Amino acid sequence: MRLLTLSLRFVFPLAIVLGVIAYGVIPLVDSLELKWFVRDLDMRSKTMINTMEGPLAELLASNSKGKILSYFTRILQDERLYALGFCDLDHQLLYETQAYPQDVTCKDTLNLASNSSTVRSFSSGPLHITSASIELNGNRLGRLLLIHDMSFIQQRSSDTKWYVFYLFAGLTAVISLVTVLVAHFSWKEWVAGVRAMLKGERLLTPLTHDQHAPEVRPLAKDLRSLVQALESDRRMRDESQISWTPGSLKTILHEQLAGDQVLIVSNRQPYTHYWQDQNIVVQVPASGLVSALEPVMRACSGIWVAHGNGSADRNVVDKRDHIAVPPSHPSYEIRRVWLTGEEEAGYYYGFANEGLWPLCHIAHVRPTFRSSDWKHYVAINERFSQAVYEEATTDNPVVLVQDYHFALLPKLIRDKLPPATIILFWHLPWPNAESFGICPWREEILEGLLGSSILGFHTRVHCNNFIDSVDRLLEARIDRNSSTVSYGGKMTAVNPYPISIEWPLQWLHGQRSVPECRTKLREAYGMTSDRLVGLGVERLDYTKGILERFMAVERLLELQPEWIGKFTFVQIAAPSRSMIEQYHHFTDQVSALAEQINKRFGRDGYEPICLRIQHHEAFQVCECYRGADLCVVSSLHDGMNLVAKEFVGARDDEQGVLILSQFTGAARELTEAVVINPYDIDQFAAALHLGLTMPKVEQRARMQSMRGLIQEFNVYRWAGRMLIDAARMRQKERVMKQVRRPSLLN
C-alpha cells in the first residue's frame, strides 16, 4: 500500500504536467504543419511555373483563347490546383478557369513579387495564391496566377491534433508505468543504470542480479532508439538551416569547438614547389583529396602537415619547415615533413600503393606486402605523429587525418595528445572482411584507425565493411545501431560522410564563357568548331577504367560509323606513381590502345582519341570541363570520384552529359547522370551515343538537379558535419565524466 501511495504521488503530478505540455504543443504542431504545407505548395507552384512558362508564352503570342483555356484545363488535372488565371500588363484578367474565385483580382495581387506566393482566406476556405511573371524573348507578357485549394489542410490539422492527444495519453501511461518500476530501485542502482544506457551498454551488475532487470532492459533499448531517432532528426534540421560556406565553418569552430586549432595531415600537399629553368614554380597536384580539403583549410586556417616532395620545397620553407599558402593570398601554413628516397619507396610506393591501394580497390591487381615496406610505413607514421605533436598549440586540437597513408596515425596521436579530437577520413573504399584479412598487419591497422574519435567513409557500405572487419579480427564492443566501436577504453564513431567540392568552384572566377571554352578546346587539339568532344580527367591509374572507356569509344565507332570524324575523345591523364611496375605497365597499355584505335579509325586531320599524359592546372581542367560535350568517369572501383562533381560544378550553362560508373560513390548521389557498368563495353558505347544525341532540354533538367544537390551538399557541409559530430562527442564525454563523479563519491 505504501508503494502504491508513493507511486501515485509521482503519477498524478506527471499526468498534469504532460497535460499542460500537450495543451501548449498542439497549437505549435498545428502552426508548423501549416508552414510545411505552404512550403510544399510553394515548391509545387515553382515547379509548375517552370514547366508552363515556355508553352504558355508561345500560346499567348498566338493569342488563341481556345488553346490557352484548353492548356489551362489540362494543367488543372492536379487535384490540389484549384484555378488558373492570367493578367495582362494593364492588370486585367484575360483568361481564367471555370472555378476561378471572383474575390481574387489582378490588382489585389499586385503586391506579390514575381514567383512569390501568399495564403488568403475566403468563404470557401483558405487559398494559396502564386504570382509569376511570363516573358517571351525578354518581353514581359503578363502575370500567371496559380491558386491551390488548402481546405484539405483543415482536415489534416484536426487529425493531427487528435494524433498528438493520443500520443501524450500513451506517453502518460508508459511513463507512469516506468515510474512505478523505478520506485523499486535504490538511487545508487538507478545512477548505474542511467550510465549504462547513456553508454549504449547492456545493464550489467549489480542490476543483472536484481529481480526487475529483465523488465528494464527493453526499456533501455527503446530509450536508446528514441534518443538516436531524435538526434538524427535534429541533425537533419540543423544542417538544413545552415548556409554551408567558409564562414559557417569558422562559426562551427568558434561556437562548437571553442575555436580550437585545426590541423590537417595528408601525404599529398596542396601546393608543391619545383625548379623550372632556374625558376621556382608552384603547382597544385592533381588530386581529389587536395581539391576537397584545400578550400576547407582556406576557410578554417590552421596548419597542413604533408610530405614535401617538390624539388624546390626545401628552398622556400622557413627554419621550422613552414610556408604560407596560397601564394596569392596566404591564409594557412604547410608544415613539410621530409622523407628519404628509400623511405618514400617503402612507405608510399610500397606498402601504401602496392599493398593497401589494390587491397581496397577491387580492380584485379594483386596486392604486394613486404615486411621492409611495413617498417618504413610504421616509421613514417611515427614521424608525422611527432610533427603533429610539435605543431599543436594546445593539448586538444582538432586533427583531420587523411587517407590510407596514415592508418596508424590516430593511435599514435592519441598516445601523445589524449584529449585531442581526431577525425580520420578514409578516401578509398573499404573491402569486405574476407578481402581485408589478406593484409598481414590487419590487426595493427585496425587498432591504429580506432584511435580516431570519428572514422569517416564515403558510404554506409564501406562503414559496414569496416565494422565487420573489426568484429572478425578484434575483441571490441560494437553497437551497430549507433555505428560505434569501443576498443581499449575509447569509443570511435564510424560514419558515412560523402565528400564533395566547394561551391561555387573557385576556378569559375575569371573563367571564359562556355562558347569561348568550346572554341579554345577545339583549337588546342586541332579540331573543327562543330566537333563533338568527350572528356576524361584522371591520374593515370588502373582503377579509373581508362582502358575500358577507350574500348567503348572503339565500339561506338564500330557500331555507329557516322561518328567517325565527328566525335573525338580527349583524355587528360596526369602521370602517377611511375616507379611502381603495375603503373608503368598500365601507362604502356593505355598509350598502345589509343594508338591502335587512332590507326584504325583516324585519318588526316582526325584522331578519335587525343591522349595527353601530362599535368594540367586546375584552371585549365575547368576550362576543358566547360568546353566538352560530355564527361566520362568510368572507375572500376572508387570511393567517391570528385571529377564527376567538378564537371557538374563547372557547367553553369546547365549543359553537358555526365557518364558515370556505377562503382563510384558519386553514382549514389548523382543519379541523374547516365550510369554505366564500365565492364559492359556495349552498354558503355550505347551510353556514349546517348550522351552525344541527348536533347538540350534533357541535359538541362539532369544538370539542374545534380547542380542543386552539389550546391546543398558541398565540401563545407562535408567538413562541417564531421566537426559538428566531433563537438557532440566531446560534449557527451564531458557529461559522462560528470555522471561518473557523483557515483565514485558514493
Image (cartoon, rainbow, N blue to C red):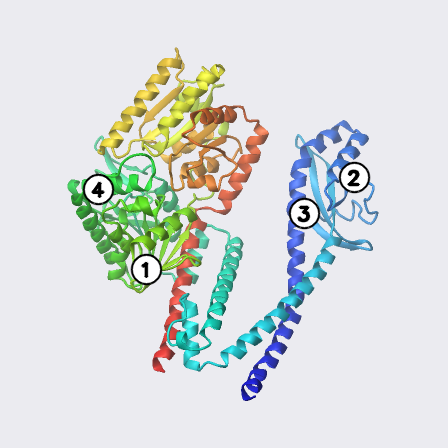
Q: Earlier in the sequence, mark 3 or mark 4?
A: 3
Foreground mark, 1 or 2, reads: 1
Q: Earlier in the sequence, mark 4 or mark 2?
A: 2
Which of the 4 image quadrants contains residue 394? bottom left
Whether tag 4 and tag 2 are in contact, CB under 8 A, the answer is no
- The Cα atoms of the two marked residues, 1 and 2, are separated by 75 Å
- Across and down, in percent, residue 556 comes to 45, 20
Q: Earlier in the sequence, mark 4 or mark 1?
A: 4
Foreground mark, 1 or 3, reads: 1
Q: Which residue was labeled with disc 2?
A: 90
User: Which amino acid type is shown beneath numbered disc 3?
Assistant: Ser
Characterize the local packing of mark 2: few (<14), some (14-19) or many (20 or more) Cα atoms within 10 angstroms.
few
Q: Earlier in the sequence, mark 1 or mark 3?
A: 3
Question: For residue 116, which numbered disc appears in the image?
Answer: 3
Q: Which residue was labeled with disc 4?
A: 369
The structure residue drawn at horizontal position 32% and vertical position 60%, both measured from the top left corner, is: 476
